[in-house]
Image (cartoon, rainbow, N blue to C red):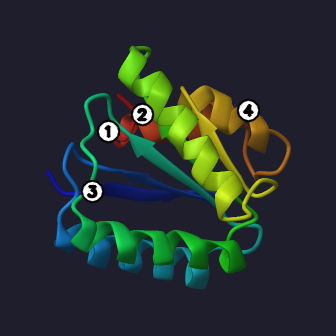
Amino acid sequence: MPIQSAIIDHVVFIRWGIQAVAADLDAFDDIMSHGRKDVERPLFHVALLPTGIEMPPVSIQKPLIKRVLRLRASCQSMHCVLEGNGIKEKLGRRFLNGMVKMFGLKDQAYVHATVQEALGLLDGKLGMPVAEVEKQAREKGLLG
């Protein structure tokens, strides 16, 4: 399934499928380009990773990492929500937290178990209440 995305208030949401494919990179570029052009600063990014997501192939990992690192210039903060409470998801969040530190994103990128945790850090920074942002994201089918 290709990525789903939406811009709500100052937040660019991207919901990834179980297996990333090359076309997802173009879709990622498109939505981030719209966010940079259409949204007054600050801009925030929330990536939603579903339970059971698979590690992308190396051919996608490297270009995806480059894109994420470029987000530093355009996003005040980046939030990765790895959904699920199983051991695989907990280890995945720990791994992602390690990557955040390794790439020097400690004060700009965050890993969460729920979208509510991610949006909680944005409370007071958006033009609308975070509850409304969450409601609109749910209505657009972005939240599981």
- Give the number of the mark in front: 2 or 4: 4
**Callout 3 environment at 10 Å: few (<14), some (14 to 19), or many (20+)?**
some
Q: Is residue 68 left or right of residue 85?
A: right
Marks 2/1: CA–CA distance: 5 Å
Residue to which mark 2 is pinned: 138
Q: On the image, which quarter does residue 8 sit in? A: bottom right
Q: Are marks 2 and 4 in contact (CB under 8 Å)?
A: no
Q: Amino acid at mark 1?
A: Gly
Seen in the picture, residue 91 relative to 111 is either above or below; the reply is above
Q: Are marks 2 and 3 in contact (CB under 8 Å)?
A: no
Across and down, in percent, residue 19 comes to: 19, 50
Residue to which mark 1 is pinned: 141
Image quarter hosting the C terminus: top left
Across and down, in percent, residue 46 comes to: 55, 50
Q: Are marks 2 and 1 in contact (CB under 8 Å)?
A: yes
Q: Amino acid at mark 2?
A: Arg
Res. 120 mark: 4
Which comes before the other along the chain, label 2 or label 4?
4
Q: Is residue 27 left or right of residue 33?
A: left
Across and down, in percent, residue 102 comes to: 66, 59
Q: Is residue 110 visible?
A: yes
